[in-house]
Image (tube, rainbow, N blue to C red):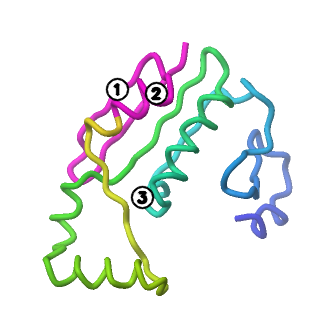
Amino acid sequence: MLRQKKGYRKKPPFCFLHYDGVHIPLPDQSIDLIFSVAALQHIPKPFVYNLFFEIKRLLKPSGFAIFQIFSFQSFVLQEMNQEKWFEEIKRQITGKKTHWHYFYAKEELEIVLRYGTGFSAVDIRDGGGSYWTCAHCH
């Protein structure tokens, strides 16, 4: 994406950022909308939970975060069986390269976003294998 940005002629109303994965280098309350599809399920949960704090920090008082994230139903849809699950766990604990998806429960997202992170409004909708989540902080 960063390479493609160089070929973009007009100044877009958005920007591409490369950051360390922990702290997003933007000022507090500077973003109206944060939108993410098919990204968060590739990131280890502690980093996603940290990202929720960053999202809350970045959103303007009237801002929203909307994201799609895999539910455990997706685990079933991907035909994850005991053998595949066991092999994936072995790859992870031995440090081998893997393409793992992290799955979430609706209750987990609700508790982490509302009580852990402090979003005042959280709406989570089932999307058949994923959850569409909207979070607002004020």
Near-viewer residue (36 or 94): 94
Q: Secondary structure at mark 1?
A: strand
Q: Are marks 1 and 3 in contact (CB under 8 Å)?
A: no
Q: Residue at x 51, y 49 (%)?
A: 48
Relative to residue 62, is residue 36 depicted above or below? Answer: below
Residue ID for mark 3: 41
> Disc 1 versus disc 3: distance between alpha carbons?
18 Å
Q: Residue at x 67, y 56 (%)?
A: 21
> Disc 3 versus disc 2: distance between alpha carbons?
17 Å
Q: Amino acid at mark 2?
A: Ala
Query: Dot 3: within a 10 Å radius of its alpha carbon, few (fewer than 14), some, or many (20 or more) residues?
Result: some
Q: Which tag, 1 or 3, sits closer to the chain's start?
A: 3
Q: Amino acid at mark 1?
A: Asp
What number is the disc on residue 123? Answer: 1
Relative image position of residue 12 (x, y in whole percent): 78, 45
> Disc 1 versus disc 2: distance between alpha carbons?
7 Å
Query: Dot 2: within a 10 Å radius of its alpha carbon, few (fewer than 14), some, or many (20 or more) residues?
Result: many
Residue 120 in magenta stretch: yes
Q: Residue at x 75, y 56 (%)?
A: 19
Q: Which tag, 1 or 2, sits closer to the chain's start?
A: 1
Q: Amino acid at mark 3?
A: Gln
Q: Quadrant of the N terminus?
A: bottom right
Residue ID for mark 2: 135
Write down the region rendered in magenta: 110-138
Residue 115 in magenta stretch: yes
Q: Are marks 3 and 2 in contact (CB under 8 Å)?
A: no
